[in-house]
Amino acid sequence: MFNPYPIKKETASFITKDGISLAADIYRPDSRESFPILLMRQPYGKTIASTVVYAHPSWYARQGYIVVIQDVRGRGNSTGNFNLFAHEISDGLETIEWVLTIPNNTGVVGMYGFSYQGMTQLYAAANGHSALKTICPAMIAHDLYRDWGYENEAFNLQYNLAWSIQLAAETARLKGDETAYQKLWVASRNLPLFDPIAASPQILQDLAADSFYHDWITRYLPDDYWQNLSPQHLLKNIDLPMLHIGGWFDPHLRGTLSLYQEMQVRSIYPQRLIIGAWTHLPWGRKVGEIDYGQEAISPVDKMQLQWFDYFLKGQETELFKNPPLYLFQMGSNQWRYLEKFPGENQQIYYLASQGLANLREDEGKLSAILLEPAIEDTIVHDPWRPVPSLGGHSALPGGIFDRTMLDCRSDVITYTSPPLEKDLTILGSPRLDCYCQADAVSFDICAVVSQVTPDGRVFNITQGYKRVNNPESSLNMVMQATFITIPQGHSLRLSLSASCFPAHPVNAGTGSYPHQSRAIDFSTITIKVFCQGNFPAKLLLPLVGES
């Protein structure tokens, strides 16, 4: 049986080529042996060390690793100015060179961490340093615009605003500006969503003029700014073994899946993917209102340790005796090993209605066959009372919630299937195809797939959101990937609305983008969803098993 090492901790720093001091806490076994290095680079204060989701670094050190937790430039005890992601490639390279000077290391480095700490792994890897042998990126953006800033051209308002205020508050704290810090602290607890321009709150203009947020909200289309910071562009010629980690309700799952799928195709090294029933944090047994039991608790630390033991110590592991996908299946509440995501196996549900699907839950139908005749459904979006966000991957808090009350609103169209005759298991990204028409030059569509229990409660499964910049549009909306079994006797439901606020900004209907949209100029928008004609509306569900 393994006997954990006693550990010791020290704080150290080095000076970069441009004169910046980067500080780190080093946890290491109290032993004369040599050990591999695990590195995490993060902006939230090195003492936290991502312990909101991972074991404390001392746990990894006890397993025989030198663990280095570093404050990135301009954060914590590191000097310089913090500029989101801007210096992480060069600072990552110099940090790898520095950690290799720590006494009694074996000359090999692995990296781990989630969110920003996941991104710093990818930026460091972009240098191609030979000592960096493997990384474990969790909850990251592959394409920064598509996977973090926006979803289908709709700005991710709630997440990005909350994050920008958190980072701005830390900047104020480091400067000793108590007045600014206190104002930002209050704003973080009650987001400033009701300024004249909701997506450009005055507090960020006054107290965080240098925040990344101003770039993100004004760069509403992909351009060189986004490309230059996107790992998809930076890692084209880089190949490493990677342990990819995501959550079914994480806002960055698109990025995790995209990176895994690209590396799985082109890499000569093993790639593995873990996805749990988690939001961005924590990685526990409960997501929203649903408790998935002890099985759902994160296995990441133990699996990550096996990964590092194999690639940094050359020890054999059970990991590679199993298929590459390790996914938590909601409904059965079990982890499953799979070779790949399903291909062409899908169930098509056609949308049908006699025009009252926004008023009666028994009116809109999801049918395996095309029902005729059917007419369009109409909703009126009132910007004074937008449909609120509730759970899912893009709202705070995220996860699964009872949305029965939302589906009772007259500005939400619902289409419901008959009770299932047998269990139905969805694995992958559902897609909505439909034709919409609006009396405004721009509008949004929110699509939510839910399960309806026999007693009438409605629990969201997955969703998608899209900004539409044409009054007539044929939509093809890919939703968040999921893995869930809907039991026999339950029904499926698709809910459509024109807002999901504050997860996304309210569309003004004028063609203006959120940073230009003043509340006083918002338009009431009438939207028609056509079920038949040249574009039969349908929901496509990727299935495991028979379709």
Image (tube, helix red, strand yellow):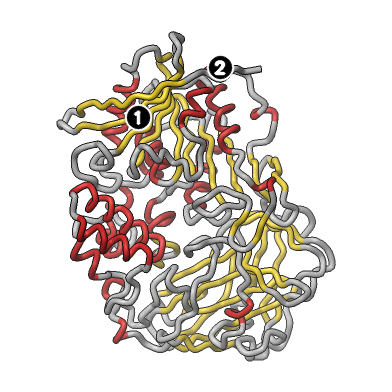
Disc tally is 2
Specify which label sits upstream in the sequence, 1 or 2.
1
Give the farthest residue toward the left: 19
Image quarter of the C terminus: bottom right
Q: Residue at x 62, y 90 (%)?
A: 359
Separation of marks 1 and 2 at Cα, in angstroms: 26 Å
Quarter of image, res 429: bottom right
Assign a secondary structure to mark 1: strand
Q: Nearer the viewer, residue 24 or 72?
A: 24
- Whether residue 235 appears in this view of the structure is no
Picture coordinates of residue 239 (x, y %)? 45, 30
Picture coordinates of residue 427 (x, y %)? 67, 54
Image quarter of the N terminus: top right
Instruction: Determine which of the numbered discs, if any, sits on residue 56 in the image.
Output: none
Quarter of image, res 481: bottom right
Around disc 1, counting alpha carbons within 10 Å, would you say few (fewer than 14), some (14 to 19), or many (20 or more)? some
Around disc 2, counting alpha carbons within 10 Å, would you say few (fewer than 14), some (14 to 19), or many (20 or more)? few
Q: Residue at x 58, y 61 (%)?
A: 288
Picture coordinates of residue 242 (x, y %)? 51, 33
Type of amino acid at the residue the image marks with label 1: Asp
Q: Residue at x 45, y 27 (%)?
A: 110
Assign a secondary structure to mark 2: loop
Instruction: Determine which of the numbered discs, if any, sits on residue 314 in the image.
Output: 2
32 to 199, vertically: above or below: above
Horizontal side of residue 459 vs 383, given as left or right: right
According to the image, label 1 marks what residue?
A: 25
- Whether residue 431 appears in this view of the structure is yes
In this rendering, which labeled residue sits more in front, label 1 or label 2? Answer: 1
Quarter of image, res 25: top left
Q: Residue at x 79, y 73 (%)?
A: 419
Type of amino acid at the residue the image marks with label 2: Gly
Picture coordinates of residue 220 (x, y %)? 32, 64
